[in-house]
Structure formats: C-alpha cells, structure tokens
Amino acid sequence: MNFQVHTGQVRHRYVWCDQKNLNRVLLNILSNAYKFTPEGGDVSASIWEVGSGENGYGAYELRVRDSGIGMSREFAERIFNAFERERTSTVSGIEGTGLGMSITKGIVDLMGGTIEVLTAPGSGTEFVIRLKLRLAEARDIPAPQDDVKPNETAKIDYSSKRLLLVEDNAINLEIAQMILTQAGFQLETAENGKAALDAVAASQPGHYDAILMDIQMPVMDGYAATRAIRGLADPRLARIPIIAMTANAFKEDEQAAREAGMQAHIAKPIDVATMMKTLDEVLIAESGRED
C-alpha cells in the first residue's frame, strides 16, 4: 500500500481544536480507506489552509483519498446514516458495523464543520472535511526549545535501535511504522501477541531493543504476550523493554500494563511527541542498566 501525507499548504501550524476527536475522525476515515483499497493501491491524506485571518480563525480543508473500490451514488448519499453499508462491501468479504461514518459526521458537525464524499464505483473515494479553527496566538505557541525532536536532546542514535512493533490494525500499523522509520529506527512487525512471542523467543539476545505492544489483538492479547515473554528461559530475552499501546487511557489500564510486566504506556491515537519521549526514557533506562 502506498501511503502519503501532504501538509505543505499550511501557513498557521498551531490552532485550537478538539485534538482527540479530530484524530478519531481522521483515523476512522483512513481505516476505511485502507479497508476498501486493494493491496498495491494508494491512500493519501492532505491538509490545506484555504483562508485565514478572519476574526482570528483559519479555514482548513482535510482530504483523505484512496484508489479503492469506490461507492455508488445512491450509497454515498446515505453513508452518514447509522448502520448503512453497501452490499458490494459485504459481498467482497469486508466486515463492519456501518456505524463509524455516522459518528464521524456527528463529531465534524459538533466542531462546526462539514464533511462530504466524492466517489464512484471503481474510481476510489475522497472524503473532504472543512473546518474553521481558531489560530493560536504567539504566547500559546511552544517555545523553540520545547519543540525540538526528542532525538536532539536525548542523544540516542535511533539508527542503531531495532524495535518490534506488534499491531493487528493495518492503519495503526502504517502510521506507527511511518513515525518510527522516519525517526531512524530499524523496525520489525508482528500481527498479534503470539507472533511477537515467537519472534522474541527465536531471536538472539540484543536483537530487539524494545517492543511496542498493542493490547487488544486476536490469538494472543498484549498482556498475555508480555507475561509469556517475561517467562522466557533466557533472562536477556525475558527483560526486553515492552511499551503498551492502547486506546484505553485510564489509570487502571496503565496499572494493568505495568502489572503485566510492561515498562510504559502510550495512549492511542498516537501523539508523536509522547511516543518519542517514552521511547527515549525507556531506551535510556535500559542502556543504563547493568547486566
């Protein structure tokens, strides 16, 4: 799958918005784009600043386009209704409740924006979201020293570090891969906890520097996989740092991750700065541990 992100047409980078729910909207649309695009197809996400300065607000246009199976005009007119799903998607074996786009439109409506779909059978689909967002003032924008990449302050050579990314959701996997490989990490992936356990058990000590572990997965979940890795006979493999990645961000979820043997916890949707800061902390702590 060819995935591209375009942000070059943004003049004002900092705005006030409901970041968590806007992430939910984009991830839901991207997830659908991947779901309905055959292997080898194209998915792209772009953001455009199409106007700014009006009463301190900027006009933004977010577009997600895929080269997938597309939709009929009749279905596209009903796509934002709850529990709507086109027959062709069912026939193709793609599952789903049909509830996601209804929620997505509801969130966009609450933000005072609009969402539309441009599509045709066999010609792919493009979702267009238009929002007016209040521009951040100079005093609200992080100072340059607060906005440096973690790699610049932590002095970690990411290119020498190999991570095992364990994730069963294709879009979450693609996003995390993009973030980590652009940072310089060597990366291997596993689609569930059992595959991760097998990969670690078959590896040489030191092959993996850390594991990013999703929690809710088929075959074996993240907690069970972590406990199994901690039980490996070779103590050098058993102590590999493991970081939980989960949409559940409550204190009890963080505690459950630590009780399973994980060193840290990252909430989804992924915040890049938080992910890199957490990786820095875990890798620095591991490098300072005596064998």
Image (cartoon, grey):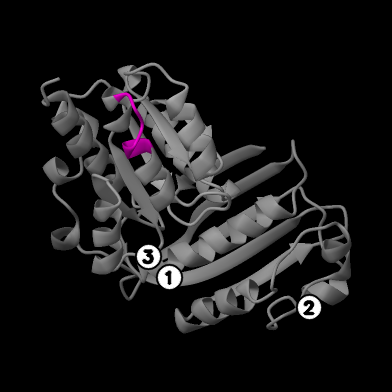
Which of the labelled discs sits on residue 21, or is there none? Answer: 1
Which disc is residue 77 wearing?
A: 2
Quadrant of residue 230 within the rendered picture: top left
Q: From what the image shows, is residue 13 above or below residue 236?
A: below
Where residue 150 appears, as percent x and y from the top left, is: 21, 36
Q: Position of residue 24 (x, y in %)?
A: 48, 65
Which mark's residue is nearer the viewer, 3 or 1? Answer: 3
Label 3 to label 1: alpha-carbon separation: 14 Å
Lower sequence index among marks 3 and 1: 1
Left of 227 or right of it: where is 26?
right
Residue 141, magenta (yes or no): no
Please report the bounds of the magenta region as a residue range: 229-234
Residue at image mark 3:
248
Q: As shown in the figure, which amino acid type bears the numbered disc 2?
A: Glu
Residue drawn at point x = 70 percent, y = 54 percent: 35
| Amino acid type indicated by mark 1 | Asn
